[in-house]
Image (cartoon, rainbow, N blue to C red):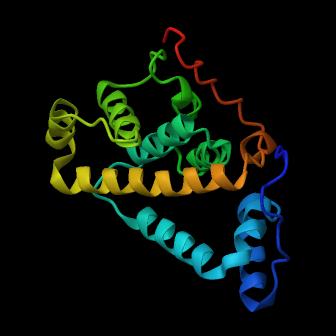
Amino acid sequence: MTTSGTRVPSAPVTGLYGVVVKKFATRMFGSMPESIGVLWHHLPALKASMAYGQKLQKWDECDETLKTYAHMAVASLVGCSWCLDFNYFMARDKGLDLDKAREVPNWRASTVFSTLERQVMEYAEAASQTPPTVTDEMVEPLLAALGPAGLIELTTVIGFANMTTRSNTALGIESEGFASACGMKPLAERPAVGSPA
């Protein structure tokens, strides 16, 4: 685990639901993530977030690779090491291109991404600014490539990514080393603000 300490201490994960969560988490990660203990203080919020995340996983109007890269681009922009690590780890389970997934934090300078993938990550970052900086010129090629339903699905995933990344960052929830525990290469570094891409 690489966390330096969450801003809210972990609660004991107890009860029947706790048994189910522990079993699922241990099967998926090998151990119980500290982040679940933090969110355990408010079970309705934890359950709602997990349920919505699981629903998003079942949608299929937009390519899984594009949605994963969008979520990772948001996490990199916001600075959520937990979401970056988790999505990189999950990319392996989804059979995605791991060499590309590890490059998402440095997508602007990297040469491994297709034009569409770059447009998706640019859109994800623009939608995540305050206020959003999305333009018609960004949306037009995405609408043409993904169709209305695909673009709405992608945008919804970006919105969910903002909820989880910003919540984790505010609570001090950081990477728990899922990817490194599996021997995956370290993620590329995001260039410092103001440095050339």
Give the image location of residue 41, x and y in percent.
73, 76
Q: Residue furthest top?
A: 196
- Residue drawn at x 72%, y 36% is 184
In terms of depth relative to the viewer, which is nearer, 165 or 152? 165
Q: In this rendering, is residue 8 above or below 189?
A: below
Q: In this rendering, is residue 15 above or below 10?
A: below
- Residue drawn at x 16%, y 53% is 148
Give the image location of residue 72, x and y in percent.
52, 41
- Residue drawn at x 25%, y 55% is 152
In terms of depth relative to the viewer, which is nearer, 98 or 146? 146
Count the marks: 0
Give the image location of residue 78, x and y in percent.
55, 40
Q: Horizontal placement of 168 versus 63: left or right?
A: right
Q: Horizontal placement of 120 versus 82: left or right?
A: left
- Residue drawn at x 71%, y 62% is 28
Q: Quadrant of residue 56?
A: bottom left
Q: Residue furthest bottom?
A: 16
Q: In this rendering, is residue 22 above or below 59?
A: below
Give the image location of residue 85, x and y in percent.
66, 43
Q: In this rendering, is residue 98 above or below 182?
A: above
Q: Residue furthest front?
A: 131
